Amino acid sequence: MRIFAFFGVIIGLLVSFNTHAQSPCDGADHTVLAGGFYFSPEALTIGEGETVAFINEGGFHDVNGDISVLTGESFGNPEAFSLGAVNASGMNVCIGAYTFTVPGTYNYDCSIGNHASSGMVGSITVEAAPSGCNDNLACNYDASATSDVDCTYNDGSFDLSDGIYLVAANSLDPNFFCDVQPNVGELVQMNDTDGSPLTIVVDEALENYINGLAAAGQITSLEAALALGAFNSATFSVCNEIITGDAGLTTITSAWNGQSWSIEELGFNLAPVSTISETGCPDPDALNYNPCGIPDAAACEYEETMGCNDPLACNFDSTATGVADCNYFDTNLFTLGENDFIGLVDDEDCESGYPGAYSLPVPLMQDSTGGPLYFVLFPDVESFLVENDFEIAAQDIATVSMSVCDTVMNYNSLVIGDTDLYWDGMGFTVDVYGSFVAPESSFPIGCPDPDACNFDACSHPFVTDDCTYLELGTLATAAGDTGMVTMTELDSLTFVATPGDSLIVEWDSECGELIVDGNTATLVAPEIGDCEVCVEAENAEGCEIESCIVVTVLGGIEGASPAKWQLMPNPAASELRVVWGGETTPFEVVDLNGRRVHTVTLQPGSQVLDVSALKPGLYLAGPKGQAPQRLAIQR
């Protein structure tokens, strides 16, 4: 009976320990395995606040981080911890998990039987979480700190939540003594996130504002580019009423002068909206014009008789005293909200109207004040006009102001003067440039892509949903090569086309004789030099598509040039094939001033080099140690 009683106590203890050991092990940051006289890993390093799970791989074990079984004394841990004993029979069992919140070294053992004396001991080192701020831009910079996790970049000197006004200093009205005049500036937002430097949100409105300053001659184009670059990259802090910014090569520092921060490095003044206590009328023609307050058009006061005394407006009245009532768009021909396009008038391209397929987008807009109409000149459109010798037209489009009154566009241009353009059923013709301006509603929906089978030069420039195309895969050699290939005059080379169904294939080449067999063609007896092999596919309606391969034909063994290297094609665009008969060596390209602008390792044989990064022009190129050849890059 005593034996049964003893086993009953043991079983009771096991049940008690298993009940105590139900702390969850899932989701722990680290795991320690317990088994036959071991903890694994025996030594573990973790971070402050991390959790360690203890898993029993077999046997009867606990985790004791309080009183050492070996010494009978306290381990002296930063804080005592323990997990009750758990029995495991052939499967892993969770003893429990413990979260260590106090840094330091923790020693522990298994207090069951002689487990500790048999080596079942372990230690856990808890490293303190990084703290402090070692970013010298921050308000709480500490040179001794080891991280930037606690940095503060806005000490609360100013409320930045409503944004800041940014104003070019030389655009201020000198008749008013305020550093920031919102009506000639731009409201921008600042990203103010805890722990991160402040940044300015550079959006399209800010870009247009700064570029507009350059267009108006208030700052130079270089100053505009530098300002946009700085605002795009700068990080800021506001500490003790001082704004500090780091924009790479530009460092910004300005103390609050009671009205603004003056960023002299960029020529702008900044002021949080929260610092401007009053609203003001932004209209210089109003009786109570006040540029120093937050713009509020509703606050403007005018003489009772205003009307419209602007000759450009549709409702011009010579007896009026202001422009508050002017109307610059009064027609039923099209809407101000639709897209507008400009292009060269070419009746041969489009017999029924304007060639929309060859036109450029120039939206007709009106600002929030309801003033004269103007064109939006996109950078890509401006570049296209300048590159095609229409620079004067680009200047005109960028500066003209207009009104549209019934069938007349009153065109007030700084370039070609004040003139009237008349509606011709589709748009307005600008005879000086031989161009047209037309709204999108004047263009029928069709296919404006010249590469499509159903190309329609008259169709809407932006809508291509109705375009249809032939299918002709890329022309390749029988070996699968495309783009550029090399052969000798003694070789033959087979090309393979992959046209779509029901297409008629026609081969063409000036390289030599082509032996055609349906969708394949073999080039024989080629002539030395550069040439093209092309295949053209045509459907029953006469729509055509073409694909070509550039072939470089080298001389055979008997006619081989004594020169050790060749390059082709010349001029080149983006790829250059070099045939080299020597050992591996550098291939160098230098400009006409002797500066090396490109180098690559040249292997023996034939290889294609990428020269797309070279600007168009003349260069000298060749393997190092060889007489260079003139190389032209053209695109």
Image (cartoon, helix red, strand yellow):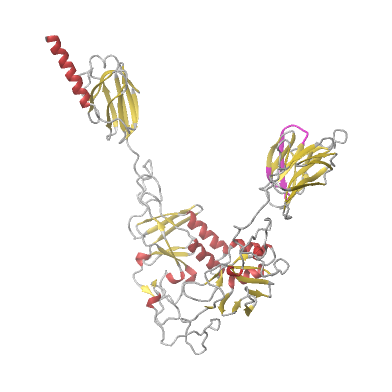
Q: Nearer the viewer, residue 605 or 585?
A: 605
Q: Is residue 73 visible?
A: no
Q: Where is residue 490 in the image (x, y as percent from the top left)?
A: 84, 35
Residue 166: x %, y % from top left: 44, 65
Residue 619 spot, x, y in % from top left: 74, 48
Q: Is residue 619 above or below residue 69?
A: below
* Count of numbered marks: 0
In the rendered structure, does residue 472 fall within the stretch colored magenta? no
Between 138 and 125, the one nearer to me in the picture? 125
Q: In this view, does 188 lie above or below 194?
A: below
Taking the view exactly as shown, the residue that stands out farthest to the right is 558
Viewed as shown, does residue 572 lie left or right of 465?
right
Q: Residue at x 45, y 85 (%)?
A: 306
Please state if 160 lies on the left or on the right of 359 as rendered.
Answer: left
- Magenta span of residues: 580-598
Which quadrant, please, contains the N terminus?
top left
- The residue shown at (13%, 13%) is 5
Above or below, 4 against 65 in this view is above
